[in-house]
């Protein structure tokens, strides 16, 4: 390697009671895509926050292009050519894309912002990295993937030579992720350096030159990507042999639990809505709904759960027409729901685990007597869930907000499955989770299916759909345009996802 772009040596950062980063050495070469792979809590974000000046390290030193530097805050980091895109975005909602990009780095022309010149520069930047954008849209109207593009463009516009992307794909669809990967490649071809943080093995293998694997605050190893295999990475990351196969009981679907016929619904969220969608889910099967996000998935789930009214067509749960029923009436038909956005509708973040496990069931006779909650029953139930579903927490009074994403999701799935529902509607159940939690949640879905429940799995993670589903329904522009059986490959699915109907 020529002179490294960046060298971090002996970095240590502690928080009260936690050594988040423990003596880490990291070298990043110019023009490379360096992967940092690790499970939740491995210390990846902390290490990068130290580099970007957001945390002061306890020990260690940092060199940029061979020169020792002292990064006291992010202004120092930016001045050194570092740029960072976090998982949570920092755009100003009521400013346009253009205004957000140039915020804080406006080129001036005799003291005034030269709008035409700024625009020209930003257009040129967009052309270079291939992140197409309409510059006049308000940030608040952008879908998530585009918000991220703005953040990247903003960092580049400020002159970032090293771009740090912290779990960027957690908020992207597979297609958006592919666009991002292409742009990362173009950036490095143009001489920039990218540090790409992820916990996803496939991604890190697909886009990096080298990979540093972290576990519990330490670097386990650094490998050349071309020499890496799934097993080497997974074992280094998790620290044990990773079991990738689920055990499926023989496929013997039973009674029809969910029957949807010709369902249409007008659109919310600026997507296309539903447009004559039909599908069924029977007991003992996982039916996967695959599709690029925005093809009607949200509307489908919301119609089933009574959160939205279809404009035509029918929904039957165990034979009963439910189009006009309320959510609470639908839940009584032995349906459980793992919602798309766990922080918005799955949990109340400021409530404790104990309070969250009884959300939606507060008037059930299991927890109340003559209309009053019986705290001991609730607490026992919460403890059972924490134990049975491996929730890692110091107790049931911990607020949901203070659990990791994986553990939040275990609380939700645990709560939903505890009622022994006939039908489980799981919407993006593993989105944004680390490998271990993903594996665990998926195994719960398989177990539910093996024990005779029906599962409707709506997911934009195609590997998840292919691994778990007995039948795969491909949703495109609001209707099902093809069905695949277990064993189908990504190639077959890919064609359907692009809207080429199965003949
Ligand atoms: N601001 C903070 N205060 C206290 N503990 C923190 C803070 N940030 C991170 N940690 C802890 O440091 C460890 C590493 O976290 P983090 O760097 O976020 O890991 P990763 O990004 O790999 O998921 C975890 O145990 C986490 O709980
Ligand atoms: Mg992180």
Image (cartoon, grey):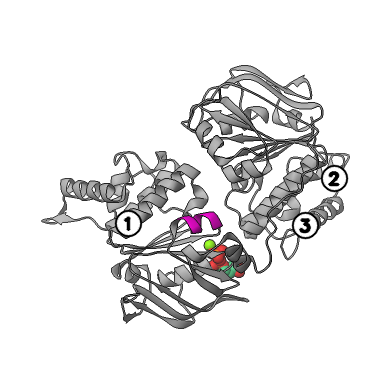
How far apart, in angstroms, are the residues tagged by discs 2 and 3? Answer: 17 Å
Q: Residue at x 60, y 72 (%)?
A: 216
Residue at label 1?
187
Residue at label 3?
386
How far apart, in angstroms, are the residues tagged by discs 2 and 1? Answer: 57 Å
| Residue 180 spot, x, y in % from top left | 41, 50
Mark 1 neighbour class, 10 Å CA radius: few under 14, some 14 to 19, many 20 or more: many
Q: Nearer the viewer, mark 1 or mark 3?
A: 1
How far apart, in angstroms, are the residues tagged by discs 1 and 3? Answer: 45 Å
* Nearer-the-camera pick, 60 or 73: 60
Q: Are marks 1 and 3 in contact (CB under 8 Å)?
A: no
Q: Nearer the viewer, mark 2 or mark 3?
A: 3
303 is within the stretch colored magenta: no
As drawn, the residue found furthest toward the right would be 369
Res. 337 mark: none
| Residue 145 spot, x, y in % from top left | 44, 45
Mark 3 neighbour class, 10 Å CA radius: few under 14, some 14 to 19, many 20 or more: many
Give the magenta part as a residue range.
201-206
| Residue 472 spot, x, y in % from top left | 64, 33
108 with respect to 319 (left or right)? left
Q: Is tag 2's residue or tag 1's residue first in the polypeptide sequence? A: 1
* Label 3 secondary element: helix
* Nearer-the-camera pick, 463 or 492: 492
Q: Is residue 356 visible?
A: no
Res. 367 mark: 2
Instruction: State which quadrant residue 219 falls in.
Output: bottom right
Instruction: State which quadrant residue 78 falls in.
Output: bottom left
Q: Is residue 149 visible?
A: yes
| Residue 320 spot, x, y in % from top left | 77, 20
Assign ligand 1 to one image quadrant.
bottom right
Q: Is tag 1's residue or tag 3's residue first in the polypeptide sequence? A: 1
């Amino acid at each position: 390697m020529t002179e490294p772009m960046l060298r971090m040596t002996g970095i240590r950062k502690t928080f009260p009671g936690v050594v988040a980063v423990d003596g880490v050495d990291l070298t990043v070469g110019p023009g490379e895509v360096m992967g940092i792979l690790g499970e939740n809590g491995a210390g990846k974000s902390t290490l990068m926050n130290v580099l970007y000046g957001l945390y002061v390290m306890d020990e260690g030193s940092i060199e940029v292009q061979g020169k020792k530097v002292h990064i006291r805050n992010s202004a120092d980091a930016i001045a050194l050519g570092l740029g960072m895109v976090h998982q949570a975005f920092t755009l100003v909602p009521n400013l346009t894309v253009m205004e957000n990009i140039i915020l804080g780095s406006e080129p001036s022309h005799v003291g005034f912002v030269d709008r035409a010149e700024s625009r020209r520069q930003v257009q040129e930047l967009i052309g270079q990295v291939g992140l197409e954008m309409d510059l006049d849209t308000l940030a608040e109207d952008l879908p998530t993937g585009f918000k991220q593009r703005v953040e990247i463009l903003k960092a580049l516009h400020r002159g970032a030579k090293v771009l740090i992307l912290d779990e960027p794909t957690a908020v992207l669809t597979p297609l958006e992720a592919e666009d991002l990967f292409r742009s990362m490649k173009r950036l490095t071809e143009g001489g920039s350096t990218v540090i790409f943080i992820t916990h996803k093995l496939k991604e890190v293998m697909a886009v990096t030159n080298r990979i540093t694997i972290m576990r519990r605050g330490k670097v386990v190893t650094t490998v050349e990507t071309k020499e890496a295999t799934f097993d080497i990475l997974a074992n280094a990351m998790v620290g044990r042999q990773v079991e990738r196969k689920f055990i499926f009981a023989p496929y013997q679907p039973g009674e029809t639990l969910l029957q949807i016929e010709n369902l249409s619904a007008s659109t919310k969220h600026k997507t296309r809505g539903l447009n004559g969608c039909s599908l069924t889910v029977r007991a003992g099967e996982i039916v996967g709904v695959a599709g690029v996000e925005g093809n009607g998935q949200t509307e489908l789930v919301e119609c089933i759960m009574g959160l939205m009214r279809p404009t035509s067509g029918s929904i039957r749960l165990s034979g009963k027409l439910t189009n006009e029923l309320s959510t609470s009436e639908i839940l009584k038909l032995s349906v459980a729901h793992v919602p798309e956005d766990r922080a918005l509708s799955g949990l109340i973040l400021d409530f404790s685990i104990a309070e969250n496990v009884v959300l939606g069931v507060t008037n059930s006779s299991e927890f109340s007597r003559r209309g009053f909650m019986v705290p001991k029953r609730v607490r026992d139930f919460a403890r059972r869930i924490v134990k049975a579903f491996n929730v890692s927490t110091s107790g049931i009074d911990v607020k949901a907000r203070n659990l990791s994403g994986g553990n939040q999701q275990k609380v939700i799935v645990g709560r939903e499955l505890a009622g022994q529902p006939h039908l489980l509607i799981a919407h993006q159940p593993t989105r944004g989770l680390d490998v271990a939690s993903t594996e665990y949640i998926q195994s719960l879905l398989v177990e539910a299916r093996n024990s005779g429940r029906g599962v409707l799995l709506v997911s934009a993670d195609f590997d998840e759909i292919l691994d778990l589903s007995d039948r795969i329904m491909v949703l495109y522009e609001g209707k099902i345009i093809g069905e695949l059986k277990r064993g189908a490959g990504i190639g077959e699915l890919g064609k359907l996802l692009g809207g080429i109907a199965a003949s």
